[in-house]
Image (spheres, rainbow, N blue to C red):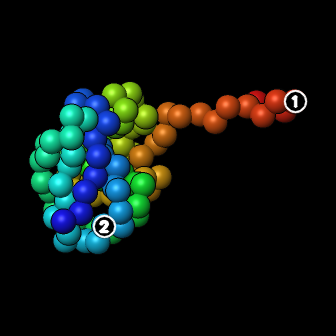
Amino acid sequence: MKRAIMIDEGDNVATATSEIEAGDEVEIISPSGAIAMRLRALEPIPFGHKVALKDIGSGEEVMKYGERIGVASRPITAGAWVHTHNLESLIQPAPIEGRAP
């Protein structure tokens, strides 16, 4: 059984704790350590990447760590890999000292 961790109860994505293959059943571990849900991966999800816990509409907020990290750039189905191909990030890198932003 593959696993992914949900950092906050309000998250709509979880982080894969190992490589996940398409069709794998994934246990989603809640912040308390309990199994919050199970879902089937729709596609390969690399270790450390995000899996959608529910359907997320285009333009809808993507929540991780209990924070808004971006918006879906297209519809995302529960069990799908969430990354730059379907997520517009709101996280901006910190400017490098001595460089203009």
The extreme front residue here reads 33
Q: Amino acid at mark 2?
A: Ile
Query: Which quadrant of the structure image shows residue 81?
Result: bottom left
Depth check, front residue: 74 or 100 = 100
Residues packed near mark 2 inside 10 Å, few (<14), some (14 to 19) or many (20 plus) = many
Residue 11: image x %, image y %? Answer: 27, 35
Taking the image as shown, residue 44 lies to the left or right of residue 41, namely right
Residue sitting at 43 percent across and 34 percent down? 69
Depth check, front residue: 41 or 32 = 32
In front of the other: label 2 or label 1? Answer: 2
Q: Which residue is mark 1?
A: 98
Q: Amino acid at mark 1?
A: Gly
Residue sitting at 42 percent across and 55 percent down? 48
Residues packed near mark 1 inside 10 Å, few (<14), some (14 to 19) or many (20 plus) = few
Residue sitting at 59 percent across and 34 percent down? 92
Q: Secondary structure at mark 1?
A: loop
Q: Secondary structure at mark 2?
A: loop
The extreme right residue here reads 98
Name the quadrant of the N terminus: bottom left
Q: Which residue is mark 2?
A: 20
Residue 5: image x %, image y %? Answer: 29, 46
Name the quadrant of the C terminus: top right
**How far is the residue under mark 2 from the one under mark 1?**
41 Å
